[in-house]
Amino acid sequence: MSPASTGASTRVDAVSPVRSSDSAPDSRMAPGGPGYHRMSFALFLAGVATFALLYSTQALLPLISGEFGVAASEASWTVAAATGGLALFVLPMSALSERFGRRTVMTASLAVAVSVGLLVPLAPSIGALVVLRAVQGAALAGLPASATAYLAEEVRPKALVTAIGLFVAGNSVGGMSGRVITGWVAQEWGWRVAVGVIGAIAVACAVAFRLLLPAPKHFRPGSLRPRVLLGTVRDHLSDPLLRRLYAIGALFMTVFGGVYTVIGYRLTEAPFSLPQGIVGSIFLVYLVGTVSASTAGRLVGRLGRRGALYLAGGTTAAGLLLSLADSLPPVLLGLVLITAGFFAGHAVASSAVSKTATRGRAQASALYQSAYYVGSSAGSTVGAMAFHSGGWAGTVTVGVLAVLGVVTITVLGSRAARVAALRQPVPAH
């Protein structure tokens, strides 16, 4: 498939196999090959721990508001601080992974994050809780960019989208299980015990991750010199395709962050008035995200990257509009569509970043993750503010505008690809 047909720049397929010579076989992992299943399961567990910790307070916001006597817009900072901390530190962490190795940085990040996670239940005030969550998010910054860079180096190109889709699927399972578990535990024993349970689960995931993840074979240490790092970042930001992918990730996450920060408030209020345990169980719809993320590779194969993004955006928008109903079944169906569209779009965009960057992959992925979690922080904060002022319709309006942004950027990318294709010289016969 040509770059023009997918909306990619001519650099997309420039990632060459890692070989000792032109005739040597590709030694990177592939489905069914040695180490692939261990690697997939290890990174799946890392994704579970990351999302379970990162969003551990999201389903509990009504209870946190009640204990500390704060509004939804203030309680939402326990989510926004974590995602904001991750967005701020993901680039420095990616630089450390270029120097010290992906597995080393991921292990250290998980160790610090789970340690802080055991302190979160002890927070004496909303301010202390927000600070602890910010530190936890900063620690988790070593996971996303390092994981995608590890996969880009250790997995064969044809299997890359599928491998990253499995990591993203782990994110969805972590987000789902964290919210479901905290919902039911909090209903019986309060939000503090609930986040403590999530911390303990994350500890188990972190230990298993370190034991299972194969040692990297194709990592080559880079430089920690700021000048080199800034040069790499500048190169990535000057690439129009990468800029579009960063914006798409941020906009998708704006929708998702806003919806799932506010949905607990909506469902505990009239006309639904659901108990906390049932509200937590609503997050079982994350299973849909697990499926849509893990099948993103096949979706791109059939529709191309642009087609997959259009489908993801349209699915998300349909879910947003359906969720405006005052009846529970259409609201649940709307959440299913929002979740499926978001995770598919995220898997497609993040894997495209890894394929596009021919060097400094950790920095390229870090910039994507930074934009992605800035979108999460913005969605959590703006979505809560919109809910406070305009109800659920206000949150939906924010989401629809973000989806329109995704569609607009994809259309502009398609036009840019066509122009680039026309400018390419015709081979002489």
Image (spheres, helix red, strand yellow):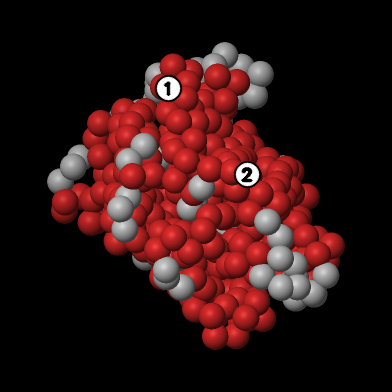
Residue position for label 1 = 207
Q: Quadrant of residue 361?
A: top left
Q: Amino acid at mark 1?
A: Val
Q: CA distance from mark 2 to mark 1?
A: 25 Å
| Element class at badge 1 | helix
Between 421 and 162, the one nearer to me in the picture: 162
Closer to the camera in the image, 422 or 25: 25
Q: Which residue is mark 2?
A: 184
Q: Is residue 141 above or below residue 22?
A: below
Left-right relation of 324 to 133: right
Q: Nearer the viewer, residue 18 or 137?
A: 137
User: Local crowd at mark 2 within 10 Å, few (<14), some, or many (≥20)?
Assistant: many
Dot placed on the residue nearer the N-terminal end, 2 or 1: 2
The answer to whether 136 appears left or right of 289 in the picture is: left
In the rendering, at what x and y percent does residue 181 appear? 60, 41
Q: Secondary structure at mark 2?
A: helix
Kindly tell me whether residue 391 is visible in this rendering: yes
Residue 161 visible? no
